[in-house]
Image (cartoon, rainbow, N blue to C red):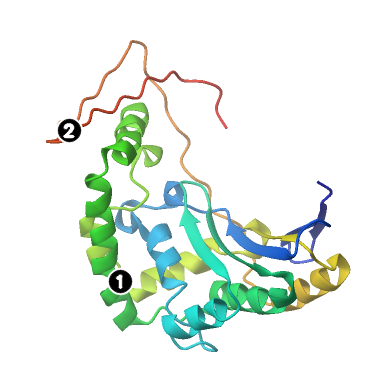
Amino acid sequence: MNYKKTTLKNGLRIITAPMKDTQTATVMVMVGVGSRYENDEERGLSHFIEHMMFKGTKKRANTQIIANELDAIGGEFNAFTGKTSTAYYAKSDAKHLDKTLDVISDMFLNSKFDTKEINKERGTIIQELNMYEDMPMRSVDDVFEGLLYGNQKLGRQIIGTKETIGSVKRNDFINYIKRFYISGDTVVCIAGKIDENKLIRKIEKLFAQMNQGAKPEFEKVIETQNAPQIKIKNKKTDQTHLILGVRAYPF
């Protein structure tokens, strides 16, 4: 696949990947922040912000309007949060690319973080946390990483804790966005049936006023293991899940 990397004056990176044999186009905006960057009081905030990006902007007042616009064009859209990055994406027929780019960029740049919506979403995220606890196939990964890194930030669950999910306030969201959602640590990637040059000009215009600044550093991992380790989590279930791993080269 041929692709082109363009870096704007404000540091934003654009990856364009034209594909001749498709009628679709996918837009993804990814920022280089995840749970590894959170302090103790912010645990789960990266993931909480991901949820809130779908709850309304100045231009699109609520979740229903955002969903309706993308559903109306047969679009597929979602987001995900990791330990070092968070991403938002939408895919549709290429003729609707202007619409998907407008919606995703609007969410990313102009979300309202309404206090009422934050309070409503707390329950949804706590339900999600409980659901993961009932999925041993998934939670075994958290147990394994907790063994590898202990109470260091890489050893924590991305979703956070019930205490932090229940206590973060709107100002915490706004301050976190200002610190980490900066142009120099954001990548806009578009792949599919696209007009590369036209698209780059459009993205440059949409993201021209994005926050700039220096990204805070994360704490380096301290590894002190010198003997085999084991961690067992007991749960009443018909299944047993095992991870066997070794330490390898760092990122």
Question: From the viewer's perspective, is 134 left or right of 46?
Answer: left
Question: From the viewer's perspective, is 45 left or right of 76?
Answer: left
The correct choice, above or below, for 100 with respect to 194 in the image is below
Mark number displayed over residue 121: 1
**Residue 144 coordinates in the image, percent (x, y):** 33, 30
Question: From the viewer's perspective, is 78 left or right of 13?
Answer: left
What secondary structure is marked by label 1? helix
The correct choice, above or below, for 154 with respect to 167 in the image is above
Residue at 37% across, 82% down:
114
Residue at 52% across, 88% down:
58
**Residue 28 coordinates in the image, percent (x, y):** 63, 61
Residue at 47% across, 72% down:
53
Which tag, 2 or 1, sits closer to the chain's start?
1
| Camera-side residue of 114 and 96 | 96
Instruction: Quadrant for residue 191, please give it.
Output: bottom right
Mark number displayed over residue 238: 2
**Residue 204 coordinates in the image, percent (x, y):** 77, 72
Which class describes the residues within 10 Å of circle 1: few (<14), some (14-19), or many (20+)? some
Residue at 33% across, 40% down:
138
**Residue 134 coordinates in the image, percent (x, y):** 22, 46
